[in-house]
Image: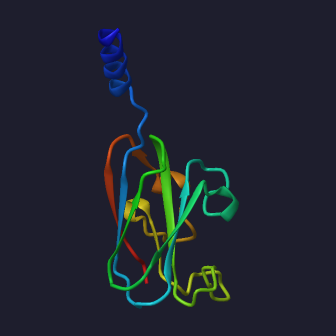
Amino acid sequence: MNILFLFTTLISTLFSSENPELIIKVSNIEKIKGEIKIGVFNKETNFLKEIGSIRNYAIKVNKSTAFISITDLPKGEYAISMYHDENSDNECNRNFMGIPKEAYGFSNNFKPKFGPPKYKDCKFTLLENKTLNIEMIN
């Protein structure tokens, strides 16, 4: 009976579906106030729209660099979008042309030129513990 228990434990450890840890380091934060709002997406459909995110996180800003550890994402493909909600109104404020007035950033440090990025520009694979370094665009 003990051998069966050990064998079962060993097999379940080898095929564990434990989620990897994703650490996001956010740098180039210019204003030390508000929060960094983070959206996690896993498909092109509704990318960058609130209804398209599968998880949302917030980091209180108290330094020019911030970190968050995420452990509730299963292995898979994702894209990250974030903005610095300086005035704590829970939205990314924009000018009359639709360009963000608050700092923002994307996974892969994608810097949009003529409009918002596409999912494929920001996607990455999370199969094991990973650290993303994202620099805010001010």
Residue depicted at x 42% and y 43%: 19
What residue sits 51% from the left and 76% below the top?
Answer: 83
In front of the other: 51 or 33: 33
> In the figure, 40 relative to 19: above or below?
below
For the point 30% across and 17% down, the residue is 6
Q: Return the x and y of residue 60 as percentages of the image width and height.
A: 45, 79
Task: Using residue 52 as the reference point, say whether residue 133 is left or right of it.
Answer: left
**Residue 86 spot, x, y in % from top left:** 52, 88
Number of residue marks = 0
Displayed quadrant of residue 49: bottom right
In this rendering, is residue 108 above or below 82?
above
- Please tell me whether residue 113 is drawn above or below residue 76 in the rendered image: below
Query: Measuring 63% from the left and 80% from the top, which residue is drawn there?
Result: 90
Which of the 4 quarters of the picture holds residue 115? Answer: bottom right
Image quarter in which the C terminus is found:
bottom left
Q: Quadrant of the N terminus?
A: top left
44 relative to 20 in the view: left or right: right
Kindly indicate the quadrant of the structure image that contains residue 128: top left
Most foreground residue, 92 or 71: 71
| 1 relative position to 119: left or right | left
> Residue 61: horizontal and vertical position, in percent?
42, 83
The chosen color scheme is rainbow
The vertical placement of 65 against 95, above or below, is: above
Q: Residue furthest front?
A: 1
